[in-house]
Image: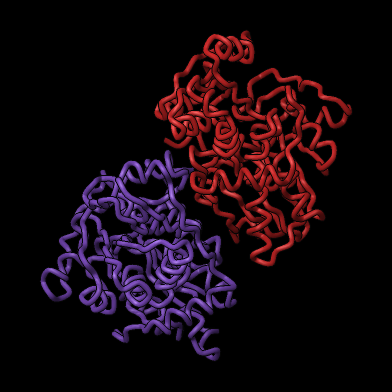
Chain colours: A red, B purple
Amino acid sequence: VNIDIPTFADIESAAAVLAPYAVETPLIENHDLNARVGGRVLLKLETMQRTGSFKFRGAFNRISRIAPAERANGVVAFSSGNHAQGVAEAAALFSIPALIVMPKDAPAAKVEGTRARGAQVVFYDRLSEDREAIASRICSERGATLIRPFDDRYVVAGQGTVGLEIARAAAARGITLDAVLAPCSGGGLIGGIALAISHLSPATRIYCVEPENFDGMRRSLAAGARIAAPGGKLSVADALMAPVPGEIPFAIAQRLLTKTFAIKDEDLLEAVRYAARTLKVVVEPGGAAALAILISNDFKLENGCAAVVLSGGNCDVVR
Amino acid sequence: VNIDIPTFADIESAAAVLAPYAVETPLIENHDLNARVGGRVLLKLETMQRTGSFKFRGAFNRISRIAPAERANGVVAFSSGNHAQGVAEAAALFSIPALIVMPKDAPAAKVEGTRARGAQVVFYDRLSEDREAIASRICSERGATLIRPFDDRYVVAGQGTVGLEIARAAAARGITLDAVLAPCSGGGLIGGIALAISHLSPATRIYCVEPENFDGMRRSLAAGARIAAPGGKLSVADALMAPVPGEIPFAIAQRLLTKTFAIKDEDLLEAVRYAARTLKVVVEPGGAAALAILISNDFKLENGCAAVVLSGGNCDVVR
């Protein structure tokens, strides 16, 4: 693994590459939510990103950096579904083949979304098989490029454009952000956001939220080294079950994160319902983790202003 | 009824009054939708307006024009639920009492939303009672001001700010709009939008969509005079069942609308599902009417660019 940490210039470069293809997603405010949490919340709707999650950003940026001569051999990725769809969509835009290794229990919406974008899907058993080994074997057979979900300079830089957009939109409205909160699995999103926000708005505190028992980032930061969360019973947040944070995200997090939170499944599901009922947004359980920590009152806003990333909306709940 | 048609200056004035209170709602693009309809669609998400529909705009603007001495007597409105919540929220911001006359079959989410904003709710039977007569009687008993849902200069001007935002956001992105489409019931929204768009983007064609058998605007324009649609079986679009268009909206529509469409209930429900699944937006059946006419392929975009208003998201479908 290359622990080449992206620079702020890498994030700006990613933004330039993405501009014609990605959605600059809305940053919206909801009065009922503000009243409920006692502060001002700016919701970054990555649910409305191309493919329904932020993952398109990193995938497209990464694939854009493959040397033209190597592109024809295609790309391979492993993912429970959001990175899968991001890679499939980006590969289709470059007209190259994509193969995605997905868990057998992935939500139907994510499997359908991946296939609909022209990618080949190979299933594995989340509890008994090693998805990285399967993906690596296929890569070497085909000469294809592995698009890692988070431990890659260009993937993290691509996800960092979420932070770039948040910081610039807040500044354009004259808003000073006290905090930015985002969900965390391997840490590509929060790592990229932390790099962008710390550069553009150094006084803003940065937080991430993981599911209980899949809180590898929280445990690793406490231990001072990357360690695995206990895992066990699958979380409703199918997108947030990486057991260990990536090397690049962990190195960034050690330097830039204020605190990490672990959240219960029932709070994730309550946040999903709240988003549909009050915000009129379809968000998947994992995508709602940062919102959940606010509405469960575990994070106290205390009249401050926070940007909260709703990172994906690909779920079978609402069909 | 005062058929005082608002001017463009009235819409600008409404925008100024609303700026600190309303949400400037997102205007988003979705690549899957563009590919499906063969053109470019900018979705105006009034689902994310305060109270979950565009109705807050007109209600707040109208209440802001009540003379201070009369405000204490409060306001009364009749509504199936979106105007109800808009009036209740606006009245609460002015700290004045609100009473809303609602049909007994109004969606639970709308009744709850109205009461949660502090308004008193009085029910009536949609098929056997006259809601306007009930509201007028209560108004004269209390000396309260009736906030009409569409036949009011300031209500139409308030709804017109949707058109103002669409035109300005499109211009800021260098986009020329071939068409704007919005749902229609009494016509306050499409009337206000038509005034704003025709002023700022005169070449843009303006269309509205009504439910089948509740297509009073379509029939009235064909007849050259306001006539009632047949009605009958209730539509799934509870927000779009005004039998006759308002006088102000009809006068505007005669001058500025290119065409009106009638849409089937099944196409409205398909649009609601499409919005949840693909756009990640919760939209109510009536709010999805303009989207439905596009995805049902009744409206041909032919590589053009259209702004489509998703006018409200207050439904019991997703809970």
Considering only vertical position in the picture, is A301 above or below B58? above
The quadrant in which the C terminus of chain A is found is: top left
Q: Position of residue A252 (x, y in %)?
A: 79, 37
Q: Residue at x 76, y 35 (%)?
A: A5
Q: Residue at x 21, y 50 (%)?
A: B298
**Nearer to us in this view, B50 or A20:** A20
**Nearer to us in this view, B99 or A174:** A174
**Nearer to us in this view, B171 or A46:** B171
Residue sticking out furthest to the left: B223
Q: Residue at x 32, y 83 (%)?
A: B5
Q: Position of residue A18 (x, y in %)?
A: 55, 44
A150 left or right of B196 in image:
right
Considering only vertical position in the picture, is B300 above or below B273? below
Q: Residue at x 47, y 68 (%)?
A: B56
Residue A27: quadrant of the picture:
bottom right
Q: Is residue B62 visible?
A: no
